[in-house]
Amino acid sequence: MSAQFQPAPFASNLIVNGDFENLSQGIGYGTRAFGWTSTGAVSGVFGHAGYTHRVEDHGYALGGWTSATGQSIAQTVETEVGTAYALVFDAGVHFGGLGAGVLEVEIEGASGTRTLASLGVEALSGGSTFSLDLVALDAQSTIRFVYNGHGAYSTTDIDLDNIGLLP
């Protein structure tokens, strides 16, 4: 008998549907993930088990097989000014051997927009888990993930899953 890996639940997670398992908005290119706002007609919720999805079946394909950079997915949450948070998420390029994709991670509020990181996301089986520390400057903060291409291989996507914002 083998035990299946189960990620620890994010009891205090401020992000809604960070695992993209609520499929009430549909599945496929152009779908809008429940709880999220997005730009770009070709990104969407997909079932790519094994790329960034540890146990669950679904994640968000940002970029959607196009060279159209600037596509994004975002969620606004209530935050406490001056409080430190950890933004955690899994990310990976959908197909191996295609090189790193570029993912910008931003936080936006009344005080403006800050880039938290510009990440080179590799094509690794299972993706990589990232953790970024931030301090809230506003009572409402928008967390945004922006697809910025793949260089020579600009027609793949970056898959996102298991997103959490933890105090």
Image (cartoon, rainbow, N blue to C red):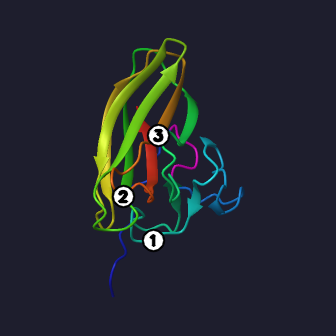
Amino acid at pointer 3: Val
Quarter of the figure with the N terminus: bottom left
Relative vertical location of residue 37 with respect to residue 99 in this rendering, above or below = above
In this view, the mark in front (3 or 1)? 3
Relative vertical location of residue 145 with respect to residue 121 in this rendering, above or below = above
Mark 2 vs mark 3: which is more N-terminal? 3
Instruction: Give the residue displayed 58% in from the left and 31% down from the top.
Output: 76
Amino acid at pointer 1: Ala
CA distance for labels 3 and 1: 22 Å
| Residue bearing mark 3 | 146
Asked where in the image residue 97 lies, by quadrant, the reply is bottom left
| Residue bearing mark 1 | 49
Relative vertical location of residue 152 with respect to residue 73 in this rendering, above or below = below
Residue 12 showing in the rendered view: no
Return the residue found at the far top.
111
Instruction: Give the residue displayed 43% in from the left and 30% down from the top.
Output: 106
| Residue bearing mark 2 | 153
Image x and y of residue 53, in percent:
42, 64
Viewer-closest of 166 and 148 = 148
Amino acid at pointer 2: Tyr
